[in-house]
Structures are given as C-alpha cells and as structure tokens.
Image (cartoon, rainbow, N blue to C red):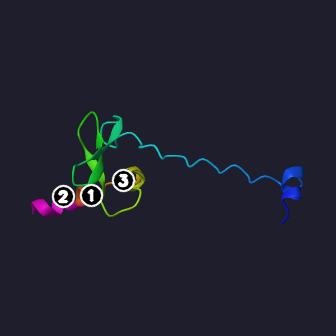
Amino acid sequence: MSTDKLASGSIPASPEPEQVRQPTALPCPFCGGSARFVEYYDGNSFIECNECGAEAGYSRPYEKESEMNAIAKWNQRSAIEPSTSVSTEAQNEAKL
C-alpha cells in the first residue's frame, strides 16, 4: 500500500476502540448496602459490603482481571425458592 493513499485519506481510519465498561457491584443482597473491592497483600480479592460486612466473589491472584471476576461473582444471585411449609394435617399427625 502506498503512502499516497494514506496521505490522501482514501483509506478509512481505524474505528475508535469501544470502551470496556467496568461492571458495578450490585447492592448487598442482605442489607442493601454498597459494596467495595478488597484486595489482600497476597493478591486474593473479594467484594465486601460496606454496611454489614458480607463477603463474596472471591478471586485468586492467578485469575486475570480479578476485580471484574469478583464483581461478577458478587452480582450472581440465586433465585429465592418459596419456602415449603408443613401442612396442618402433617403437624397433627406428628403430634400423635
């Protein structure tokens, strides 16, 4: 490719790289407090609630992008299963 084509502008410029969006930690599932990324001196890291101290999303030093991994793990929520209550009939049978 000649430099004349580059200088004349006939070759389109490279598109700007898309900015990578840093994930944001969801509020604490227990108290609703804000969460922060914590990294120990040995490289282990996790997300901790600023209000109640709940911890989750542990990442190891060998993991690439440990903060993003920890946030992704913290943000993962399990569906809440409806509680199963013991029927009145079963309670009465248990008393016998």
Residue 15 inside the magenta-drawn segment: no
Q: Residue at x 21, y 62 (%)?
A: 90
Label 3, label 1: how far apart the Cα atoms are: 41 Å
> Do callouts 1 and 2 mark residues in contact (Cβ within 8 Å)?
yes
- Residue tagged 1: 87
Residue 91, numbered label = 2
Q: Amino acid at mark 2?
A: Gln
51 or 79: which is nearer to us? 51
Q: Amino acid at mark 1?
A: Ser
x, y percentage for residue 22? 49, 46
Q: Is residue 11 visible to the viewer in this orientation of the structure?
A: no
Of all residues, the one furthest to the front in this rendering is 3
Q: Locate the C terminus by quadrant.
A: bottom left
Q: Quadrant of residue 5?
A: bottom right
x, y percentage for residue 26? 42, 42
80 or 19: which is nearer to us? 19
Q: Earlier in the sequence, mark 3 or mark 2?
A: 3
Crowding around mark 3 (Cα neighbors within 10 Å: few <14, some 14 to 19, many 20+) is many
Q: Secondary structure at mark 2?
A: helix
In this rendering, the answer to whether 36 lies above or below 61 is above
On the picture, is 43 further left or further right than 69?
A: left
- Residue tagged 3: 70
Residue 93 inside the magenta-drawn segment: yes
Q: Quadrant of residue 86?
A: bottom left
Q: Earlier in the sequence, mark 3 or mark 1?
A: 3
On the picture, is 93 further left or further right than 38?
A: left
